[in-house]
Image (cartoon, rainbow, N blue to C red):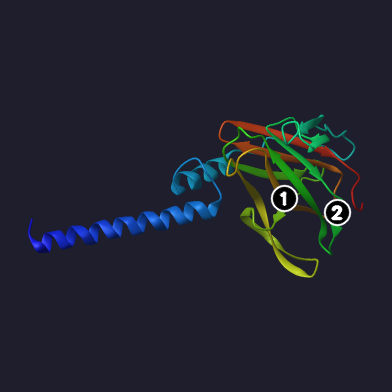
Amino acid sequence: MGRAAGVGLALLTIGLMAGLVVIGRAFRDTGLTGGPLIQVQTTVADLSARPLTMPALAAGDPCPATPLSDIDVAYGGASHLSDVEGTGPVYATGSPPSLSAWGSYYRIAYFTVPELNGPVLLRGRDLRTGRPLVFVGQLATGSTMGTDIVSGDRVQQRAEVVLPAGSAPGWGNWRVTQGLPAGESGCLGVQVDGKDFSELIVVEYQPARG
């Protein structure tokens, strides 16, 4: 092999290695596992394309709340949680709302079972009013729904949240801020979509304001 050809091959090898480093960093920064970055992006797009299958309720209809569950997020340790929303593989529990001029925001902990891998997409709506649930924060994605001021900070409202399930061993614990505009009915549906499942969590609660 000539010297010029050898130098060209070395430069090509260096270029390929640099490209792999960049891809590896991008994949690491997503916090997602299960395949190359392009595969993860495609999977999220596929989940987002699934139709929402939630009941549409009239104002006086009863809320078909999902049964509550008990989970042990530490496999027998001190983190036993009772009366969480959902039947799995994703569960949720929340805190009292904070109010803004626009509506109400709830800080929700979503838990994913240890064997669940790959992105999990959340979307939701008020089942009586039909108004969409919005998400704010680092995990929020999808269409832009508007902006608001929350605790003195301007936030961008998004239509979806992606949970990077399987990015760490054991149970996933994802903190999500989600909100509904003023006039919420107290019956919320959250559709949870993963690669091989779809789960509907319906929560009945006392609205922050009528």
Tell me, yes or no, if residue 56 can be seen here: no
Q: Is 56 left or right of 144, judged from the image as shown? A: right
Residue 129 percent coordinates (x, y): 81, 46
Which type of secondary structure does the marked residue at label 1 adopt?
strand
Which residue has dot 1 on it? 175
Indicate which disc residue 97 carries: 2
Indicate which disc residue 131 carries: none
Q: Which residue corresponds to the image point at 62% horizontal and 55% vertical from the top-left?
A: 143
Residue 195 percent coordinates (x, y): 56, 35
Which amino acid type is shown beneath numbered disc 2? Pro
Mark 2 vs mark 1, foreground winner is: 1
Residue 13 percent coordinates (x, y): 25, 56
**Residue 26 against residue 117 in the figure, above or below:** below
Q: Quadrant of the N terminus?
A: bottom left
Q: Is 129 left or right of 207, judged from the image as shown? A: left
* Closer-to-camera residue (37/208): 37
* Closer-to-camera residue (112/203): 112
Residue 202 percent coordinates (x, y): 78, 36
Which type of secondary structure does the marked residue at label 2 adopt?
loop
* Closer-to-camera residue (163/44): 163
Tell me, yes or no, if residue 33 can be seen here: yes
Q: Which residue corresponds to the image point at 50% horizontal and 45% vertical from the top-left?
A: 40
Sequence-wise, the earlier of marks 2 and 1 is 2
Q: Which residue corresponds to the image point at 77% horizontal and 45% vertical from the top-left?
A: 130
Which amino acid type is shown beneath numbered disc 1? Arg
